[in-house]
Amino acid sequence: MKRPLLLAVALGLAFLLPSCKTKDSYATGMDGDFVDGVPLPERTDGSSYLGGGVSKGQFSPVQFGFDSFEVSGSEMGKVQAVADFMRSSKQNMIIAGFTDERGTEEYNRGLGERRALAVREKLIGLGVSGGHVQTVSFGEEMPAASGGGEAAWAANRRAEFGVVR
Amino acid sequence: MMIRAFCFLFLISAVALAQDAPTITVRKSDRVSLAVSPIGGGSGPGVTKVLQNDLDLSGWFELVSDARASFTVGGTAGGGTLQGKVTDNSGATVLSKTYSGSDRDVAHQFADDIVETITGNPGIATTKIAFVGTASGPKEIYLADYDGNNSRRLTSDRSISVAPSLGPGARNLAYTGYHEGYPDVYVIDVASGARQRVVKAPGTNSGAAISPDGGKMALTMSKDGNPEIYITGLRGGMARRLTRTRGVESSPTWSPNGSELIYSSDNGGSPQLYRIGAGGGAGSMISTGFGYCTDPSWSPDGKKVAFTVRSGGGFSVAVMELGAGGARVLASGQNPVWGRNSRHLIYSSGSNLNLLDVQSGRTTTIVSGLGKVSEPTWSF
């Protein structure tokens, strides 16, 4: 009688395990709120996305929906390409987050940062060390496409990659 | 007859407003009649002009000729001083004081004393505002008198300088600068111009709000892997984390006594206002009835919050009485900030900064011609 029970427990555990694994890295705390992402590494002296020491344009920017920081499945190919590069090259990366102009400025700075961090989390999920990935937000500054309209807005909702030289 | 009809119309509109939101509405007839005699002396004309404008913008007075006035303002100005005097309609002196400083400064000081003496409310004429302007090309921080005059550019970073916050008495100004390639928080000693980069943690550091006591800052930092609200000292140092969500927390504003904060969080999907104790705990959502709420500003009397609403592709300025509910849209524009009288707001609208008297609904453009202006802050 004991064996079927053990088997049932084992089966139950086997079912539980994958579901634990697919749960994203947003661990929940004792009171159910968000505990932490992966802390950012110290900045690399002498290089910044704005200031220099960084190669831009090597990878396609990841695009986002309006007011969203979710990395959609269709954008994961771009993230995968960066992950493949980083695993072999061991270079540091700065991810710069941007928004369209349709939000308020300070919220957009936060949203841009959240987009960069969302991409960083995906990279970490693909085996890249978080210690090699820095983030920065420019909010609605430095748009990729000027002017209004859905096409420009969509192009501006992005996270760009800069390889630290 | 005309006046009576006007008062009647105003009463009706006041009642209509009262049904929308429990905002205190001052009827025009509640304004105190005041006569400003031209100030004598060499600096008289200049001081008179500034003083009249201050008293008019204050919203408390109806400026009239001497005969009908409840109070009469007069004085002499020259050589860097102003001897100001206010008498009531019995001839008794209710205020007599000497001020020193520039013509504008002495007029502002006198105006605030008049407001406080006659109405018991704090004046706004001696306060300062700061904002982002693009007159020189890139976004830089500008400082000005509350009426938009006397403006000067504080930063010359030629990068991106944004999100200014003035401390009490406009002694310090915190802002977000990309000077070193990352958004960091800088604090400027306004009198000396000395600047320090005080928060430079990994990631994005932005949107600092100096506490009412001038000793702390609340801001957004992402060093721990998510944009959250932290509290740190005015000179940086250990940052204490306040919020813990998956979403974006931004734009904290302090309660008058510094014990609580209101901020914006999109943890529920789109940005909404939340209220949290400065010591920690869980943020509780403030129900505004609007889907996109950012840039809260807590009034110095503690009773109201002003914020930006996004609807129909545009931005509006809204005000809500805390505890009562019923947010009310007051103007088209964004980023409202309260003056220390909890009666006036300054907000941005394209290339203008506007001053809005929330009680009368009167709007005055105070800044224009400095490019696209945004993110005003107002000292207490």
Image (tube, coloured by chain):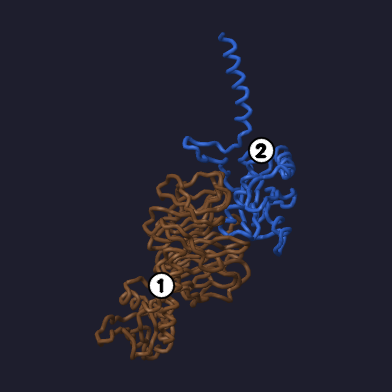
What percent of the width, then of the height, locates residue B357? Answer: 45, 72
Q: Is residue B61 left or right of residue B173?
A: left
Task: Name above or below for residue A104 compared with residue A30.
Answer: below
Residue plotted at (47% across, 68% down): B345
Number of numbered discs present? 2
Chain A in the picture: what colour? blue
| B219, A32: nearer the viewer | A32
Chain B in the picture: what colour? brown
Front of the two marks 1 and 2: 1
Task: Name above or below for residue A28 compared with residue A107.
Answer: above
| B200, A165: nearer the viewer | B200
Residue plotted at (45% across, 45% down): B282
| Quadrant assignment, res B26 | bottom left
Q: Secondary structure at mark 1?
A: loop
* Residue at the outermost top position: A1
Q: Is residue A88 left or right of residue B378?
A: right
Distance CA(mark 1)–CA(mark 2): 54 Å
Amino acid type, callout 2? Val
